[in-house]
Amino acid sequence: MKKSIIAGIGMYVPTNVVTNNDLLKYMDTSDEWIQERTGIKERRYAHRTEETTTTMGVEAATIAIERAGITPQDIDFIIFATLSPDYYFPGCGVLLQRAMKMKEIGALDVRNQCSGFVYALTVADQFIKTGMYKNILVVGAEKHSFGLDFSTRGRNVSVIFGDGAGAVVLQPTEEANRGILSNHLHSDGESAEILAMYNPGTHANHWMPEKYASFDQAEIGQMFFSHAMIDDAQVFPNMDGPAVFKKAVVKFPEVIMEALNANNLQTTDINLLIPHQANLRIAQFVQQKLKLSDNQVYNNIQQYGNTTAASVPIALCEAWEKGKIKEGDLVCLAAFGSGFTWASTLMRW
Ligand code: ACO
C-alpha cells in the first residue's frame, strides 16, 4: 500500500499583534499571570471584516499548494478543520473551494477542535493509501477573536486563544523510507461539557450537568438561541482549565508512546515533536515526562497563543521553515482538546 507524504506546507497569521498588556483594556488580568500560567506573550487577531477563518485558510493553502509544485486545480479533495467556521453551516471547505476556484471536488469539514488537524490528516492519509485521491489539501484554521468573552468573566479562556491557519498538501509517495507511518485517534465524551461552547445548539439542556445549565432553556421553547444565552455568556467557550490540564498531561504522553510503540521506535528516535500548542506548561510537562531534550520539541505558543486546529500545522510549518525538520527526520504530531479527543501521527519527513 502507498504511503502519504507532506508535499507542501504553508501557514498564515494575521499582522495584528495583540500583547498581553493590550488585553488589559478589556479585562482584569496581567502579563505576569498570563505568561506564568500559559507561556503566552502575544497572539494575532484577524481583521474584523476583511479576514475570516476561510480566508486565512486560503492564504495558508495557497503557499502549501505552491510549495507542492501544483495548482489549486490539481487538488482533488479538501479537508478543513475548525471550531470557528465562517457559517454554522455550510462548512469552510466549500467556501475555500469557491475562493480558490477549484474543480467540483469533495469538501469535508472536521469538527474535532484542538485535535482537528491530526484527525483531518488521518482521514486524508486513508484516502491516499487506498489510491482514491492524489492531492489532498488539509487545512486547520481559526478566527477565535470573533467569539471570545473579552470581559473579566471570560478571562480564563480569552487570554489563551489566537487566530491563524496552516495547511498541507498530502500526496502518495513511492519512497519506502518516507511518509506517514501511523495515526492514532481517541475520544472520551464523558467530559464533553468541560471544554465546550454550548450555544447556539439543539441540546435544550438535555446533556447539561446542573452546574452548567444556568438557565432553563426548555422554558424558552424551541429556540436555537436567545437573549438569555447571551446574557449568561453561553455563546462563548466555557472551560474548566484545571480539569483540562489534568487530562491533557496524561493523554499527550500516552498517545505519543502509542505511536512509537506501534512502530517499534523510542522517544530517543524522535527528531521533532510538534505538540498542539494548548499551553506551554502542558508541553513542558510532556517533554519532561518523556525525557525529551529542548531540541526535540517545538513550541511557538509564546507568539501565537493557542490557535486550536491551526496550531499543529502552524508549528510544523514554522519549524520546517526554520530548518528544524530535514528529509528523513522522525516527526511526531500530537494533540489533545475538547471532546475530549486526542490523537497522534508519526511520520518520516
Ligand atoms: N488573569 C488573571 N487571573 C485569572 C485569569 C486571567 N486571565 N484567569 C483566571 N484567573 C484567576 C481565576 O479567577 C482564579 O482566581 P481565584 O483564585 O481568585 O478564584 C485564579 O486565577 C486561578 O484560576 P484557575 O482557573 O484555577 O487557574 P489555573 O492556575 O488553573 O490556570 C489555565 C488557568 C491557564 C487555563 C490552566 O488551568 C490551564 O492551562 N489549563 C489547561 C487548559 C488549556 O490549556 N486549555 C487550552 C485550550 S484547550 C486545549 O487546547 C487542550
Image: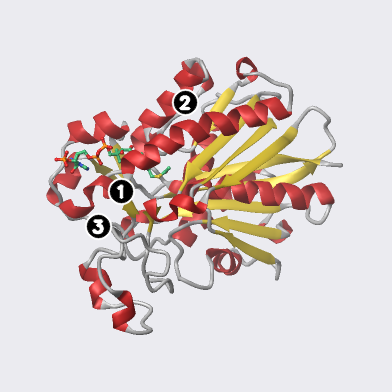
Kindly identify which residue carries mark 1: 16
- Measured in 3D between alpha carbons, the distance from the residue under mark 1 to the one under mark 3, in whole angstroms, is 19 Å
Kindly identify which residue carries mark 3: 149
Query: Which of the pair 132/6 is nearer the observer?
Result: 132
Query: Of callouts 2 and 3, which one flags the residue occurring earlier in the amino acid sequence?
Result: 3
Asked if 324 appears above or below 346 in the picture, the reply is above
| Residue 70 visible | no
Picture mark count: 3
Asked if 60 appears above or below 107 in the picture, the reply is above
Question: Image point 46% across, 71% down: which residue?
Answer: 88
**Residue 126 image offset from top left, x and y in percent:** 75, 49
Question: Image point 25% across, 46% down: which residue?
Answer: 156
**Residue 172 image offset from top left, x and y in percent:** 79, 44
Question: Image point 43% across, 74% down: which residue?
Answer: 202
- Measured in 3D between alpha carbons, the distance from the residue under mark 1 to the one under mark 2, in whole angstroms, is 31 Å
| Residue 48 visible | yes
